[in-house]
Structure formats: C-alpha cells, structure tokens
Image (spheres, grey):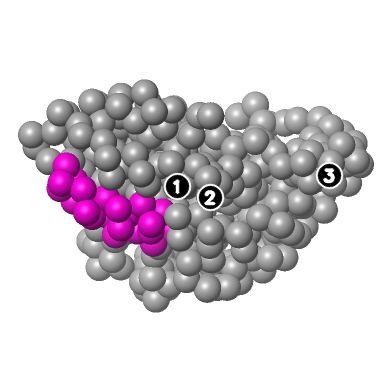
Amino acid sequence: MIIDLRSDTVTVPTPGMREAMHHAVVGDDVYKEDETVNLLENRLAAMFGKKRALFFPSGTMANQAAIKLHTRPGEALICDKYGHVHNYEGGGIAFNSGVTTTLVDGHQGMFSAAQAEAAIHPPDFYHSPKTSLITAENTTNKGGGSCWDVDELRAIRAVCDKHHLGYHLDGARLWNALVATGDNPLTFGNIFDTISVCLSKGLGCPVGSVLVGDDAIMEDAIRVRKVLGGGMRQIGILAAAGLYALDHHIERLAEDHQKAKDIEAVLNSCSYVKKIVPVQTNIVIFKVNSDVNANDLVNQLANNNIRISGMGHGKLRIVTHLDYTDQKHDIVLRALKTIQPK
C-alpha cells in the first residue's frame, strides 16, 4: 500500500463521483452548450456573489487568464515572495502577459496592506513599470496552508480602490480556508475582483478550476482562455465531478485538517525536527535540524511506502487529502515516531 502525501492532487475520483461523471449531460462547451458546465459555472458564480464564472482545465491557466485580464504588457503585479503565481506557474506572468512581479516579504505567504501599498510603483515615475494588480493566495501553499485574516484582505482592497488597482485571489485551496475559519464565500466575492478556485486539490476532482469575477473584468475571459489553449468540448463529464464535490467533499476537509494537526503534534516530539509552520489546514511544512539529511528522511519514508515532498534547504512537506484514510494515518504517525534519519 502506497501512502502518497506529496500533494492533495494525487487523489482519484470516489465511486460516487465516477457515477456522477458517467451520467453527466454533455454538449460542446466552446459553443457554451454543455449544460453541466453551465450549471457548475452558475453555481460557483452565485456562491461568491459574482456575475460570471468560467471553467478552466487547471488552476495555473485560471490564474494566468486573470492576470492577463487585469494587466497590460509592461506593467507589474504585486504578490508575496511565496506566491504560487510567481513560483509555480512556469514564468507565465512574463510569458503570457508580459508583466513583471513586485515581491513582498510577507509572513507565511501573507502580507499587510501597508506592505502592499509600499510596493506600488509611483504612477508618474515612468522609469518603473506601472503597478496594475495585487494578488493574494488563500490558503498559502509555501506558507504551510495558512489562512488570511479577512480584515487584512479588506484593508488591501481599500489600497486597491485608492490606487485603482485590480485585485485577484488565487483560491486554489480556498475551500480549506473556508472550512478552517468559517468565513463565508460571499465575503471573498465582495473583496476581490476575480477569484480562481480549484476542484482537483482538496475536493478530489480529476481536473478543473473555475474563475469567477465581475461582469466587466470577465467580458474577455473566454477569449483569453481560447488564446491560452483552454477551449474544450464535452467537458460536462469533468464539471459533474465538480458539482458532486461541492455537495459531498467540502465539509469533510475538516478531517484532513485534523490529520495534519495530528502529524504536527507527532513531529513536535521528534528530535530530528527543528521547526514546524503552525498548521491551520491540510499542509504540514517542517524543517529538520542542520545535522539531519532531509533527503535521507524522504528516502527512509519511501522505503516504508510513504511519499512526502522535499522543498530544499532542509524543508519537507506533507499534505493530507481525501484518499488518506485512518489506517494510513496510523501507519504514518508510527513511522514518523520511529524513523531515525542520518
């Protein structure tokens, strides 16, 4: 039995999800004639109080489309130094939109309104790129699944309004944040111009993300998706998985969060661990002592059929998810207690 904790993207559809996919009503989505996709888009738009939503094959494409909608070539966006759009989207900000990034040195992937405002380039100083967008990520991937405080996000909204900037949320794991904090999706819809949400991480779908936004900013979204190669045909099969997940897989995220906190508790008792990012959701990031070989720890766990991710510089990551059962959890906790990395 392989226990894969590298990411929450490694899950496979549940029997109920497969059944929903099997019976999906489909049509040609390029013509907007796929009833199931339309249903999913309308449901998510309403959930966040937005006018429009559009299905994308990946969260990266949804984020990249949002950046392109908010910016013009030669401009700049602001994000945290840990931001997914900067670190894990293949340089797409530059390649797709011709935009540069102004990085903020935040805390666990989150920054303050004051930091955001300080990062804005003076609009009358034409030697620097014009700032046109601020992006946030919730939960933060490199920040250990941390959740933003809504009041801080509102404060950054005020900065955007003051300086006439767009505001985008990479909400790949927003479902986890909503479950952990009890915040309402409408709150985020009121704060952000655009939000991308992922269906294939915590919700366990095989494929898919959705971009939601206000009418004006979403006007050209389908054109941008086409340019990026994201036009698809009978994808109601995938949208049906998303609808099923919205009905069955959101509340259960609390189970993943509890398992991650159990792992945190065990790691806190392990002599080879130097530091752990405080766990709020389903991601555990920890650093081993300087005299410990992190790769040896990864390899020893792999020899016990447990897969985790190395992040470099002695950092390791564990992500709990839908397919991580109680039985697997017991095995992992025992292994972490007994392993002796060199």
Based on the picture, tell me whether residue 270 belongs to the magenta stretch: yes
Q: Which residues are magenta?
A: 260-281
Q: Quadrant for residue 164, please give it.
A: bottom left
Check the image and name the residue furthest to the bottom. 151
Residue at 63% of width from left, 44% of height from top?
A: 204
Q: Return the residue at label 1.
A: 330
Q: Return the residue at label 2.
A: 326
SS at mark 2 in the image:
helix
Q: Quadrant for residue 268, please give it.
A: bottom left
Q: Which mark is residue 157?
A: none
SS at mark 3 in the image:
helix
Quick check: 61 left or right of 301? right
Q: Return the residue at label 3.
A: 20
Assess whether mark 1 and mark 3 are in contact (beta carbons under 8 angstroms): no
At label 3, the amino acid type is Ala
Depicted 306 relative to depicted 192: above or below? above
Label 1 environment density (alpha carbons within 10 Å; few <14, some 14–19, many ≥20): few
Based on the picture, tell me whether residue 263 belongs to the magenta stretch: yes
Check the image and name the residue furthest to the left. 291
At label 2, the amino acid type is Asp
- The CA span between labels 1 and 2 is 6 Å
